[in-house]
Each structure stands twice: as structure tokens, then as C-alpha cells.
Image (cartoon, helix red, strand yellow):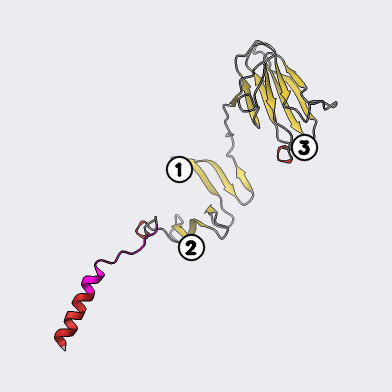
């Protein structure tokens, strides 16, 4: 009987070596945790454990800070911005740098190529009276600034793609002229328009 028991155990062990278990695409050996738990870190005095990184109940990846504290985002341990429950805060003397969207106007603009984007746009070299397009009005675009600056000696045009138009007449396909070395800011108050565009001149340095 003892021999049979030993034989049975040997057979089971031999069979077990061939079993292949289904594995996740992330190994638990990497320190990944789940179940609503967070990766932790100690405060500088080693007194408090902070739940720093995890996936919240909505499935969103979350970087967390202690209550009343901020998440610092930076490089070389120098914060470039802070995030808290109140929003994003930039340290004094720092801002958001943007090179601008380079938009090339054309005599017959195409939306996929000559579209003006939300935020800061730059017109480089272009032919006189070439145009770039403002998008069709939607609720998502309300009160979003579209800023266009010309870095060209020629006059250009900020053109409505169709509806809505530009200006109080709200005529589809209308345009706002953009002089050389001039900037313009456009926005929508309602999805059906019109686009309101105001120009301001880039001052020549003394």
C-alpha cells in the first residue's frame, strides 16, 4: 500500500509539471497591484504612507496626493506645475509655452489642410489674399479662442468654412481680412454663429 501511495504521488507530480496556467499580460512579479489598491510612498519623515498611483473606481489612472497637498510635475525634482483638487497651478514666473499651429493659407483652402485650430495659430509665408478656414460651428466650440497671427508681408484672410459666417450679418463663406504683421482672435457665442473676429496689431520694436 505504501508503495502504491508513493507511486500515485509520483504520477501526480509528473502530471503537474505539464500543466500550463493562463497568465495575465502583466506579471504580478513586477509589483502590480489591483482591487482598488494604490502603489504607496512614504513621506520624507517616514511617518505617513501616501497612496500615490493606482486605478480608481471609474477605471481612470490616478496620481494621488495627501489631502490638502499637491501633485508636483517637473524634472530633476524641480516642479514645473502643481495639480490639486482645485486645478492646475503654475509656479511664479512660469507659463505654458506654445510654438503655435502652423497653418498654410491657400487660394482655395481645404478643411483637412488649411484648418485653423483652437488656440494659437501662425500663418507663415503665403500668397496675397490666401485663406485659412474656421471650422463649422458646434456646441463644443463655444467661447473657445482661435488666435491667428500673420508672419507674412502679404494680407491674408480668415474664412468661414460655411455656416456660421463671420460678423453680425452671419453670411456663410465670409472672411475677415488679416493684414501683414497682424493678429486676430475669433470665437463663437452660439453654435449657429456668427464668428466674432477682432484684430490687434503686432507692434514693431523701437
Q: Position of residue 59 (x, y in %)?
A: 54, 56
Disc 3 packing (10 Å; few <14; some 14–19; many ≥20): some
Find residue 137 and report its image quarter.
top right
> Toward the viewer: 130 or 110?
110
Residue on which disc 2 sits = 37
157 versus 147 height, above or below: above
Q: Secondary structure at mark 3?
A: loop
At a point 68% along the width and 13% down the height, the residue shown is: 180
> Toward the viewer: 102 or 120?
102
Q: For residue 19: magenta?
A: yes
Q: For residue 84: magenta?
A: no
At a point 52% along the width and 46% down the height, the residue shown is: 72
**Mark 2 or mark 3, earlier in chain:** 2
Q: Secondary structure at mark 2?
A: loop
Q: Nearer the viewer, mark 2 or mark 3?
A: 3
Q: Secondary structure at mark 1?
A: loop
Residue on which disc 3 sits = 191
At a point 36% along the width and 62% down the height, the residue shown is: 22
Distance Cα–Cα, label 2 vs label 3: 44 Å
Residue on which disc 1 sits = 77
Find residue 194 and report its image quarter.
top right
> Toward the viewer: 79 or 202?
202
Q: Are marks 2 and 3 in contact (CB under 8 Å)?
A: no
**Which SS does the magenta portion mostly show?**
loop
Toward the left, the furthest residue is 3
Q: Nearer the viewer, mark 3 or mark 1?
A: 3
Q: Which residues are magenta?
A: 13-24
Q: Where, quadrant-wise, is the N terminus in this rendering? A: bottom left
Q: Position of residue 60 (x, y in %)?
A: 55, 54
Q: Position of residue 9 (x, y in %)?
A: 21, 79
* Relative to 206, 99 lies left or right: left
Amino acid at each position: 500500500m505504501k508503495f502504491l501511495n508513493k507511486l500515485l504521488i509520483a504520477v501526480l507530480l509528473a502530471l503537474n509539471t505539464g500543466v500550463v496556467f493562463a497568465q495575465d499580460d502583466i506579471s504580478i512579479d513586477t509589483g502590480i497591484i489591483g482591487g482598488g489598491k494604490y502603489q504607496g510612498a512614504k513621506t520624507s519623515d517616514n511617518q505617513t504612507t501616501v497612496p500615490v498611483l493606482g486605478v480608481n473606481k471609474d477605471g481612470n489612472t490616478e496620481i494621488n496626493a495627501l489631502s490638502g497637498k499637491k501633485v508636483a510635475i517637473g524634472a530633476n525634482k524641480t516642479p514645473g506645475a502643481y495639480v490639486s483638487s482645485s486645478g492646475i497651478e503654475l509656479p511664479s514666473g512660469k507659463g505654458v509655452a506654445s510654438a503655435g499651429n502652423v497653418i498654410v493659407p491657400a487660394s482655395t483652402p481645404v478643411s483637412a489642410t488649411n484648418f485653423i485650430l483652437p488656440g494659437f495659430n501662425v500663418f507663415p509665408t503665403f500668397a496675397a489674399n490666401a485663406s485659412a478656414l474656421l471650422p463649422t460651428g458646434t456646441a463644443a466650440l463655444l467661447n473657445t479662442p482661435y488666435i491667428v497671427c500673420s508672419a507674412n508681408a502679404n494680407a491674408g484672410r480668415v474664412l468661414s468654412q460655411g455656416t456660421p459666417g463671420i460678423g453680425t450679418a452671419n453670411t456663410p463663406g465670409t472672411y475677415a481680412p488679416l493684414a501683414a504683421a497682424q493678429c486676430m482672435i475669433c470665437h463663437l457665442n452660439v453654435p449657429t454663429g456668427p464668428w466674432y473676429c477682432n484684430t490687434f496689431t503686432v507692434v514693431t520694436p523701437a
